[in-house]
Amino acid sequence: MSAGTSGRVADRRTALTVPCHVSDRWLRFEEREQFEVLDEDLIQLDVMTRDDEGEPYKLCELVVARGDLLRAVAAYGDPPFRTTPVRKQESSPDPKPPRPRRRSAGAQPDPPTLTDP
């Protein structure tokens, strides 16, 4: 394997890894395989950790439907501190007014508008 090929393989492996932010565990997505189920796009992933010697160790393997995974992420929603939505919002009959932005300690108040009392 050439240096360029091994670099691409390492980049692909990194792209298929989702690290845990609070433990030394991660999800490792396997390369695509064609499963016997034609109606679903199934994804094989491993739940990984490190053994006593620090080597990667597979805790378990999951085979999940891509649609189920995407549906769960969509249902989880965006973080509450996000200021701009990242997905298209459906129009609702009663739109909510935008939340006021927090001001820093030294910020000047907004100038009054014609509707202010």
Image (tube, rainbow, N blue to C red):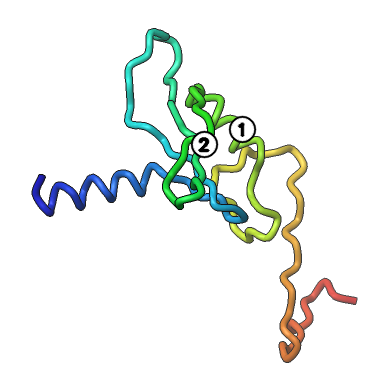
Of residue 28 and residue 79, the one placed in the foreground of this image is: 28
Residue linked to disc 1:
72
Nearer to us in this view, 14 or 88: 14
108 relative to 34, above or below? below
Would residue 73 appear left or right of 17 to someone viewing this image? right
Q: Amino acid at mark 2?
A: Val
Residue at left offset 51%, top offset 26%: 62
Q: Is residue 10 above or below residue 40?
A: below
Residue shown at 27%/49% (left/top)?
10
Q: Which mark identifies residue 47?
A: 2
Whether residue 102 is situated above or below residue 72 in the rendered picture: below
In the visual, does 8 lie left or right of 87? left
Name of the residue lying farthest toward the bottom: 106
Quarter the N terminus occupies: top left
SS type, badge 1: helix
Q: Position of residue 75 (x, y in %)?
A: 65, 35
Question: Where residue 68 sits: x, y (%)?
Answer: 56, 25
**Mark 1 neighbour class, 10 Å CA radius: few under 14, some 14 to 19, many 20 or more:** few
Residue sitting at the far right: 117
Q: CA–CA distance between discs 1 and 2?
A: 18 Å
- Marked residue nearer the N-terminal end (1 or 2): 2
Classed neighbour count for the residue bearing mark 2: other residues with Cα under 10 Å, few (<14), some (14–19), many (≥20): some
Write the residue at 45% across / 52% down: 54
Q: Viewer-nearest of labels 1 and 2? A: 2
